[in-house]
Amino acid sequence: MKTLIHGGRVLCPASGLDQVADVALADGQVLAVGQVPSGFTPDQQLNASGAWVLPGLIDLCARLREPGQEHEGMLESELAAAVCGGVTRLVCPPDTDPVLDEPGLVDMLRFRAAQLRLAHVHPQGALTRGLQGQALTEMAELSESGCVGFGQAEHALRDTLVLQRAMQYAATYGFTVWLRAQDAWLGGGVAASGPLATRMGLSGVPVVAEVIALHTITELMRVTGARVHVCRLSSAAGVELVRQAKAQGLPLTCDISVHNLHLCDHDLGYFDSRAHLQPPLRQASDREALANALADGTVDALVSDHNPLDANAKHLPFAESEPGATAIELLLPLAVKWAQAHNVPLTHALARVTTGPAAVLGGTLPALAGSLQPGAPAHVCVCRPSQQATVVGAHLRSQGKFTPFEGAALPVQVVATWVDGHLAFDDTQH
Amino acid sequence: MPSHNPQLNRHGELVHLLSIEGLGRDHLTHILDTASQFVSVNDRDVKKVPLLRGKSVFNLFFENSTRTRTTFEIAAARLSADVINLDISRSSTSKGESLLDTMDNLTAMAADVFVVRHAASGAPYLMAQHVPPHVHVVNAGDGRHAHPTQALLDMYTIRHFKGDWSNLTVAIVGDVLHSRVARSNIHALTTLGCAEVRVVGPRTLVPPSLAPMGVRVCHTLREGLEGADVVMALRLQNERMNGALIPSAQEFFKRFGLTEARLAWAKPDAIVMHPGPINRGVEIDSAVADGERAVILSQVTFGIAVRMAVMSIVAGHDGARA
Amino acid sequence: MSVTAPNAEALYLKLREAVQAWLAAQPDPAHLVGIASGGAWLARRLQTDLGLPGEPGVISSVMHRDDFAQRGLAAAAMQTKLPFEVSDARVLLVDDVLYTGRTIRAVLNELFDYGRPASVALAVLVDRGGRELPVCADLCAAQLSVPAQQVLQLQRQENGQFVMTLQDAS
């Protein structure tokens, strides 16, 4: 299949390109960006004049709830939602049911996803069997099945001896350990500790829960040599520790979610369970520090933290509801919204959802993944700037309809997404 | 997510009572003034007025409380409403029926007012957003968040004995951190213009993070009681000992218990209040609880009138609000 | 045709004369009970002027009004206070303006919450017609026709003088 996308504003963070150019795709790869060979006869064309052409996004945290917690057809709906949002690769955490701790389960998940020809699934494997925090998983085997790293999802590893050994073992093979920085004992609350949680009578997660966990992680990195990716930081103090660790040369990367980037504790409103999230939404000063850290590269990637929960999980009193929100379709528009609000150049901002995550995933991805350069896999997203688009949960492609961004204005709308040269999402007639 | 206070309709009238927060001084004063009309009803031979005749009040208590439920029952009965008590622990909710499904079923049985007590902070808001326009939710206590009718009867009691708030110093002693009564009282006192509100107790139960609510945090009883006009003691629950918050009830009493001798630090005409039930020898000793400065039984009496006022205010106007 | 508000002081004198005669004709002493607020002012002045012992009763219609569903609980300027045993008592209700009769109905319900009176009679300053219930005044100083969209009310000035006002219903 040969495709020509012409006249669009091409934005490629990898090459720094930001200019109007034609993009040619062939045999599942990017053939040319600008300077399309004269004999190129496309089977499929798109007039992208007035639109932007980007590499397909890479989302380092999106739950598919398969195997185990899914509704009918969830793998399909969530991967379709991904390409609706211009996301062509996503990492799913291992807290499925059963847990992704067996190569067979990982193979099956990747096989089923591949058949759908929508976004690529790059599973994160469990660090310990059943996420129980005791026995190690067969990381080498799991890596062969396609796991890009190993983690504990939301099940904090309390036993520091086991954590040290797990990191030590992973370091043998150069595998990345993915960890949430939240102390198990201090991290049991449902909202961010502070005046608002106190006023609302909600149990709080103090910043010190993140800080203590980060200290534990960085110290263990020093003695084990493990590479660690810290998932979904939430506080100013947290990003400052990461900044210092990076300055000291530790192989540490981290991400933040679109929720902590844009929202703060006030968005809980009147106990709105759509704003019940883990990590919790912290104060405005934390949000500001996260935005700055994303801009200056201390934070490597912006993730959606997608969780397609249904009414059974959300139509409950705040503390009884499940934390999480549907978000994969909002990753791109929210990245752009942040860029525009903070005067971050577009290619720089888009790096946080393309080359930044690609670097975290390193050798587990094909060369040039996350870029629009000749030879890169043909993962492309075309979107149009928009004046009227707003978030309407009920209209999302995902089966999850609950988002704290309900009603928010969105600056761009995706019109088409290619995965391996195949048009996986087509809204061009609209 | 509603951007306006869900307790008020678009005319600014109270249609649910969920929390003292978001209610201005005028709303609070109106409720207190209405309550004073109902105090006299309790002194008549016929202790009933027909205001809620034909309306059904459902007491939905997900957390056990015979005393609060009983006062709501009496208040509703005195307004001539039909009162139905739901023992949730034995009802279908414990079989897995969700809170909202329970409410939908009851609404289908023509419920007009839900009086709700729930262990989760914010549960009444979920309910208020879910019910149809002519159904009203009254919060009888949600988690640690709010107990608005208790604060209103406490304000009524203070107004009755002390008059105007602007010169008053009120000390709230005990487990403020876990207390919905304390939170609602703090909001009411600050809204009504109380001169100084102090919270008093050990740091684990009275942390500095309470200060943004507009209170002075005191960690010694002496500092908290010095010159106070009103002393409110809060109930200390057993779970606090298990959660590594305080070592024992005895040590709490030794340092923060209200005794006659310590009450001398407060003003000579200071009144002593307690939301009940009292733990004698823990937060308050018998001499004080039974003494002449304690107005605890008045609180109970006023509680019925205040709850009558709240129910008649939220359920009034229904014919006009089509 | 516009109606002007009547002279309240002149009407009061007429009413007082009628009440005095009525009291003298009763087999046992009667109790004055003024309907809040206008009737209560009248009852107080009558009690003093006629040299009756003790205090007049005050009765509020608020708890038994039939417009709760439309208008909510009315603000109560005064609360019911009956300083006598209602059962077997002879009661003279006093009000400023008798109109639809609904206030009287509510007040009767309120009174009967306190006991079973031997008899109840009604004295009003002005009967403006427009009855919607089978209620009538036993004593009345003036009968006036007032347009439906206007409100006739008794006011009491600082020096205690009565004045009647006529306003458009807002």
Image (cartoon, rainbow, N blue to C red):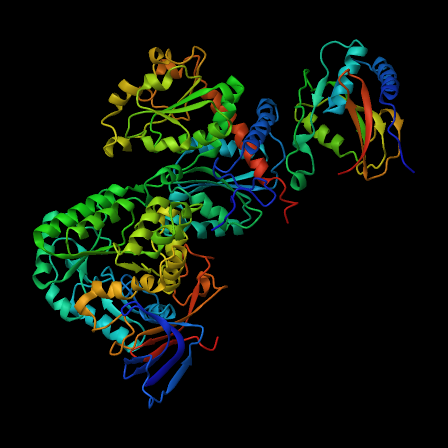
Q: Within the image, what quadrant is residue A331 found in?
A: bottom left
Left or right position of A163 against A13: left
Residue A379, quarter of picture: bottom left
Please tell me which residue lies in front, B202 or C127: B202
- Please give the name of the residue rendered at 75% of the width and 17% of the height, measured from the top-left corner: C158
B161 shown above or below A369? above
Q: Position of residue B123 (x, y in %)?
A: 42, 44
When the figure is inspected, residue B4 is found, relative to residue C145, above or below; the finding is below
**Residue depicted at x 57% and y 49%:** B133
Residue B250, given in percent of the width and then of the height, sits at 25, 21
Residue C151 is at least partly visible in this image = yes
Q: Is residue B306 left or right of residue C56?
A: left
Residue B46, located in which quarter of the rendered image?
Answer: top right
Return the residue nearer the eye: C103 or A116.
Answer: A116
Q: How many marks?
A: 0
Q: Is residue B97 visible?
A: no
* Residue B181 position in % (x across, y down): 41, 31
Percent across and percent down for residue B42 are 57, 25
